[in-house]
Image (cartoon, grey):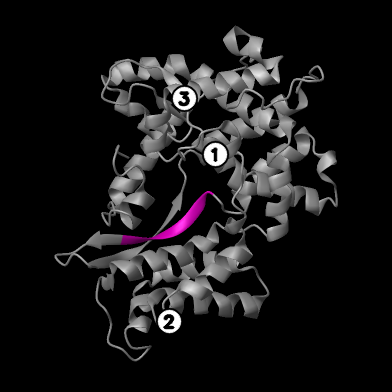
């Protein structure tokens, strides 16, 4: 992890500078160790301290969250947050991330005869043959190809009778990016109906309160250990692996630590957890009004189980030609923080959801979000 490449996936697919398996393994181990050290231990009390005073007033909580975001917006945007003018905007889900919408785009936009088109046909065949979703089929196909990945390049360069492509396959940069779009189907596992219900959930004041309170509680609890960690390492860059959840207001070249929530986490939860919660409601034949802390906790588990935080990616590398990259293999990537952070969300999202305060009429939850 570094400030420009940010993740193994981005380094490979955006910068075409995939890290070696050894470097990736060391990085994952390091990040997991950091998360275990930074996340709050024991039985902390959210009701104490500055956050405790805000929890009784959803509008004040919202205003405080947005004030903290605005003070660190340039840093948060650098690390993936959308540059939006209101907090409400971060809760707007993109319906186009449903599996059916993603498939429709791929069929309309992927270049015929390309490696991506070949991969999509293979996924189509498996989904039809086994009666599985395209997301499940994609995970299976990519797992099989990871053991004999040159088959993909070979099949696209002349079919099964073509000569072996050696230790790497050459693709154009366009082909590489199209290929990455197809194998991301593995993460886009939610139906259009799950996304429709998730959009309703994202508009619920109670759900929004739970998300904001959980993130603010995380930032509040880790601030002390984060400062100690930065002091021990002599650099704020040690906190870069957490930039999706919180950022340092003054950046990572500064020695001062003042953490602020990254609103990108709202987007991540909205697109990856809330549709899974919707799936749990559908599975129970329950309405949105039936949502409770238990269903919310099950939704977090379902998101992890359904694979939204894992994907098999291509390992792309630059070549001497500006428009050509090499593909040296495939690698299954699982967010190294998914277990501890998933456990944190599974515990605290329901906690705050169940303790949503009844506010006086006339004060709306999002009134201070602009």
Q: Give coordinates of residue 41: x percent, y percent.
A: 55, 20
Mark positioned earlier in the residue sequence (3 or 1): 3
Q: Nearer the viewer, mark 3 or mark 1?
A: 3
Q: Is residue 19 left or right of residue 149?
A: left
Q: Give coordinates of residue 31: x percent, y percent.
A: 40, 35
Q: Secondary structure at mark 2?
A: loop
Residue beneath disc 3:
70
Mark positioned earlier in the residue sequence (1 or 2): 2
Q: Nearer the viewer, residue 127 or 363?
A: 363
Residue at 45% x, 63% y is 181
> Which disc number belongs to residue 54?
none
Q: Give coordinates of residue 18: x percent, y percent.
A: 29, 54
Which secondary structure type mostly characterizes the magenta part of the structure? strand
Q: Is residue 194 visible?
A: yes
Q: Secondary structure at mark 1?
A: helix
Q: Is residue 111 left or right of residue 91?
A: left
Q: CA distance from mark 1 to mark 2?
A: 39 Å
3 and 1 marks in contact (CB < 8 Å)? no
Range drawn in magenta: 309-315
Q: Quadrant of residue 357?
A: top right
> Which disc number belongs to residue 112?
2
Q: Secondary structure at mark 3?
A: helix
2 and 3 marks in contact (CB < 8 Å)? no
Q: How many marks?
A: 3
Residue beneath disc 1:
339
Residue at 43% x, 81% y is 112
């Amino acid at each position: 992890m570094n400030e420009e490449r940010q993740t193994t996936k981005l380094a490979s697919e955006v910068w075409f500078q995939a890290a070696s398996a050894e470097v990736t393994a060391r990085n994952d181990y390091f990040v997991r160790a950091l998360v275990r050290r930074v996340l709050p231990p024991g039985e902390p009390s959210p009701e104490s301290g500055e956050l405790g005073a805000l929890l009784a007033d959803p509008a004040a909580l919202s205003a405080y969250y947005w004030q903290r975001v605005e003070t660190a917006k340039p840093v948060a945007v650098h690390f993936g947050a959308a540059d939006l003018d209101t907090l409400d905007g971060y809760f707007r889900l993109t319906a186009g991330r449903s599996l059916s919408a993603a498939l429709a785009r791929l069929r309309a936009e992927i270049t015929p005869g390309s490696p991506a088109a070949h991969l999509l046909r293979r996924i189509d065949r498996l989904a039809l043959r086994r009666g599985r979703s395209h997301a499940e089929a994609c995970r299976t196909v990519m797992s099989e190809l990871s053991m004999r990945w040159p088959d993909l390049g070979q099949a696209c360069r002349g079919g099964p009778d073509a000569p072996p492509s050696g230790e790497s396959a050459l693709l154009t940069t366009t082909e590489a990016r199209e290929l990455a779009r197809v194998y991301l189907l593995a993460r886009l596992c939610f139906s259009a109906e799950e996304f429709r219900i998730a959009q309703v959930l994202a508009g619920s004041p109670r759900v929004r309160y739970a998300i904001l309170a959980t993130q603010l509680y995380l930032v509040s609890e880790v601030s002390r250990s984060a400062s100690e960690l930065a002091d021990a390492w002599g650099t704020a860059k040690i906190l870069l692996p957490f930039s999706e959840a919180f950022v340092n207001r003054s950046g990572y070249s500064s020695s001062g630590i003042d953490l602020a929530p990254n609103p990108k986490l709202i987007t991540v939860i909205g697109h990856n957890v809330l549709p899974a919660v919707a799936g749990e409601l559908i599975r129970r034949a329950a309405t949105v009004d039936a949502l409770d802390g238990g269903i919310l906790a099950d939704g977090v588990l379902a998101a992890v189980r359904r694979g939204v935080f894992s994907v098999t990616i291509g390992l792309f590398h630059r070549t001497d030609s500006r428009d050509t990259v090499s593909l040296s293999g495939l690698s299954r990537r699982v967010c190294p923080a998914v277990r501890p952070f998933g456990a944190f969300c599974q515990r605290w999202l329901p906690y705050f959801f169940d303790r949503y305060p009844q506010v006086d009429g006339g004060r709306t939850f999002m009134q201070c979000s602009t």
